[in-house]
Amino acid sequence: LSLSGAFATLLAIRLLFTRLSFQSQPNLVLPGPRPLPLLGNLLQLDLKRLDESLFSLSKTYGPVFTVKFGPKKVVVLAGTKAVKQALINHAEEFGERDINPLFHDFNQGHGIIFANGDSWKEMRRFTLTTLKDFGMGKRLSEEKIIEECHFLIEEFEQHKGEAFDNSKIISYAASNIISGIMFGKRFEYEDKVFQEMIERDHETIYLAGSVAILIYNYFPWLGPYLKTWRNMMRNVDITKQHARNIIAELKETLNPYVCRGFVDVFCTRMTNLEEHEIQKLHYHDENLLNSVINLFGAGTDTTGNTLSWGLLFMAKYPQIQDQVQEELSRVVGVRQVQTEDRKNLPFVNAVIHETQRLANIVPMAILHQTTKDITFQGYFIQKGTAVLPLLTSVLYDETEWETPNTFNPSHFLDEEGNFVKRDAFLPFSAGRRVCLGEGLARVELFLFFTTLLQHFRFTPPPGISEDELDLKPVVGFTLHPTPHRLCAIRRQCQSEGIFPPDTS
Ligand code: HEM
């Protein structure tokens, strides 16, 4: 071997090593738009529709990229693969909540949604078990939901086919399911406290998605100067006070042998603990109050909102409504729908799934945070980094859905018309922080939607065409239908046959 040959061989080996070691090195720099000092990327984003803005950035920067909201770095996960890989395959590492100033203002680290660590773990576990016993334990929740359907039908009937805005009354009905599970009672729709709790929550969830609050989160000293923040804090105080009163009443009448719901089980657990165990095991008043507030808020706005979207889609697409009603008449007839009917109602099931997909009500999930340093898809992400699972990019993923921007129940049907599950159906998010109420919400959506469609035909108000029904959402922290009115016209053939259960 000549000297130059040996040199060339050594150089080649060296280059090969360099290349191999370069490939195995994590890429330390996450892609993303160049931030400005202090403001970060705020000026480059459409803050009024942040999810869409981030979705379009993902087309340039790929499935894992970073943006800066003011001084704060947030890693965005976009597309079905990245979101599932992070939240499911690395559930532990991506499974904490980023508690920003607003989330801290809500619950001071207590409760479920905006909590972490052992306290969150215990509250989540306790809630899931209690939901099973008082709600998702199928028959009980099914009976409660069916009973509530009939109160809702009565309300709809009072409008005698004339156009009205159904969103409030639907959210009252949805709220009565979670209220029943927590407090062991439903509220009259006219109950002023009940109405105020729902309306204050609704406004809070809307304002939580506002530009003012986005800015507050990264410059929290601005809080007292922001009207939006002051309004939100007032709402939170009022809702908490109402919840405190309800809890106090339940405590006064507590009978450990007759548990009425979540609050009773929690209080019984508290009374059985020694003083020093209460804090250690997390069964204290702050966790009780904030878990109740969390469940009430999360269990009302989401399900009610999805149902309003569902009815709007039915009015907008009357042929799809025809198919839903045809399948219901053929398979169920005039009797009350039961949860077991779902497997025999593939089209209806597909319509409910498609409603959730297109409505995309929680477009950016709720911010997560990494629990440890992790190399993900070649990028190094530090422990404690905020992570945004962009659910819009999953529910509207062009590589997963044939017509992502259109209401198309065929997304969930095979060629024979059987229902098919889809990987990219992730409205409840996934992994360690997956929606705790998913099971309950699915039963609610199915029973409310089918029972309403058995009884009513939904149409636009007279003089308004289907085309004129607006599908543009009102954007807050969640996406709501734009306020609208629909007619709920009693279906003749059904009215003879369906008898409301005895609700006395
Ligand atoms: C969290 C969606 C109904 C209770 C969430 C999250 C989403 C979601 C996207 C955030 C998950 C994440 O951080 O990655 C929905 C939708 C619903 C619904 C689309 C209805 C259509 C409900 C109901 C309840 C509920 C009925 C009440 C039982 C919660 C709670 C959390 C949560 C407590 C926080 C979980 C945690 O941080 O560990 N939900 N939700 N949700 N949801 Fe739901």
Image: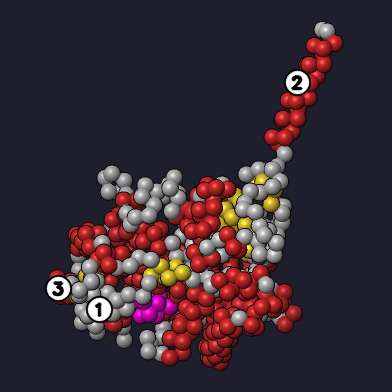
Q: Tell me the mark number nearer the camera, choosing from 3 and 1.
A: 1
Q: Which residue is mark 1?
A: 163
Q: Quadrant of residue 237?
A: bottom right
Instruction: Look at the image and give the residue range highlighted in magenta.
Output: 166-175
The answer as to whether callout 2 falls within 8 Å of ligand 1 is no
Q: Which residue is mark 3?
A: 492
Tag 3: residue type?
Gln
Q: Residue at x 33, y 57 (%)?
A: 407
Q: Residue at x 59, y 63 (%)?
A: 43
Left or right position of 436 against 1: left
Q: Residue at x 59, y 55 (%)?
A: 76
Question: Where residue 196 sits: x, y (%)?
Answer: 46, 87
Rounded to the nearest angstrom, the CA distance separating label 3 from label 1 is 18 Å
| Mark 1 surroundings: few (<14), some (14-19) or many (≥20) residues within 10 A | some
Q: Tell me the mark number nearer the camera, choosing from 2 and 1.
A: 2
Please tell me which residue lies in front, 244 or 68.
68
Tag 2: residue type?
Ala
Please tell me which residue lies in front, 340 or 5.
5
Q: Are marks 3 and 1 in contact (CB under 8 Å)?
A: no
Tag 1: residue type?
Ala
Q: Tell me the mark number nearer the camera, choosing from 3 and 2.
A: 2
Q: Which residue is mark 2?
A: 12
